[in-house]
Image: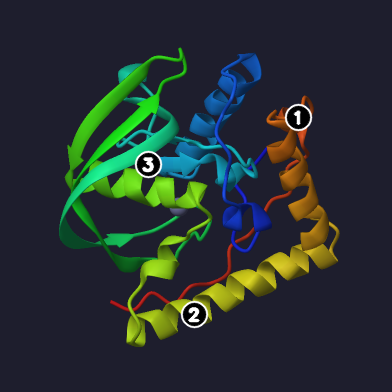
Amino acid sequence: MQIVHYPHPALRFKSVDVQQIDGTLRKVVRKMFDLMYEANGIGLAANQVGLPFRFFIVNLNARPGNEDEELVFINPVLSKRKGDVVGEEGCLSLPGLYGDVQRAETITIEAFDLSGQGFAMDLDDLPARVVQHETDHLDGIMFTDHIKEGEESDQAELELLKFVKNFRDAQADKLFVVDEALQASVQAMADSGKISADFLSTPVHKLTPPEINREE
Ligand SMILES: [Zn+2]
C-alpha cells in the first residue's frame, strides 16, 4: 500500500460509499496516517492510495502524537458553502506542485467516524480548505482542475505532463500495470464494495516525483 501519484486512474475515479466499517478499514486508515505523516501531509483521501471508497483522513499538525487530532471522515457530505477565498494548495499525489485555488470560505461537513458515529463540523480557514480538497478527491477531482486559466494554469499543465511521463515510465518498467488494468481493479473493488483482503500487502514501488519549477 502506498500513495499513488497523478495520473494513476484511481485519482480520477468517482468513489462509492463505504458500506461497512470493519477491521480492514481500520488497518487501512492507520496505514494512511503513517503514509501521510511520512510525506508531511495534512490530508489524504482513499483515492490517493488506490481505493475507490468515500473516506479521507486529516491531521492539521501533519505529525503523530495526539490521536484527538486524527480525524477520519467517512461518507462525507458538504453543505452550507459560504464566501469565496483563494489560497495555495498542494497534494501528496502531485508532490512539489502548488497552485492557488478558490474555495468556499466556510463550510459544514457531515460524516461518520471509524466507530460508525455520525458527526457534523462547521469549518473555516485551513480546515474548510482541506475538507473541500479531500472531498474533491472522492469525486475524482484534482486541485489543479480548479486553477484558473492563465499563466499559472499553463505552468501547472506543463508540470502535470512531467508527472504523466514519470508514471508512464513506471508502467514501462512494470512497476505498475497499464491504465486499463489499474482501472479494472479499482472498478472491481468498487463493485464488490470491499477492500480486497490482500490490499494492505500490495507491494510498494517507490515513485520519484519529477523536478518541479517553483516560481516565486
Ligand atoms: Zn490532494
For the residue with label 2, is its CB less than 8 Å from the closest atom of ligand 1?
Answer: no
- Is 167 displayed left or right of 18 in the figure? right
Badge number at residue 42: 3
Residue 2 placed where, x, y %? Answer: 64, 42
Q: What's the distance in space between the residues labelled 1 and 2, CA to CA?
A: 34 Å
Q: Nearer the viewer, mark 2 or mark 3?
A: 2
Residue flagged by tag 1: what amino acid is it? Ser
Residue flagged by tag 2: what amino acid is it? Glu
What colouring does the structure picture have?
rainbow
What quarter of the picture does the C terminus occupy?
Answer: bottom left
Q: Quadrant of residue 178?
A: bottom right
Q: Residues within 10 Å of mark 2 (few under 14, many from 20)?
A: some
Eyeballing the image, is 71 above or below 46? above
Q: Earlier in the sequence, mark 1 or mark 2?
A: 2
Q: Is residue 66 visible?
A: no
Counting the numbered discs, the total is 3
- According to the picture, the residue beneath numbered tag 2 turns out to be 157
- According to the picture, the residue beneath numbered tag 1 turns out to be 196
- Is 14 displayed left or right of 105 in the figure? right
Q: Earlier in the sequence, mark 2 or mark 3?
A: 3
Q: Please report contact status of discs 1 and 3: CB closer than 8 Å, yes or no.
A: no
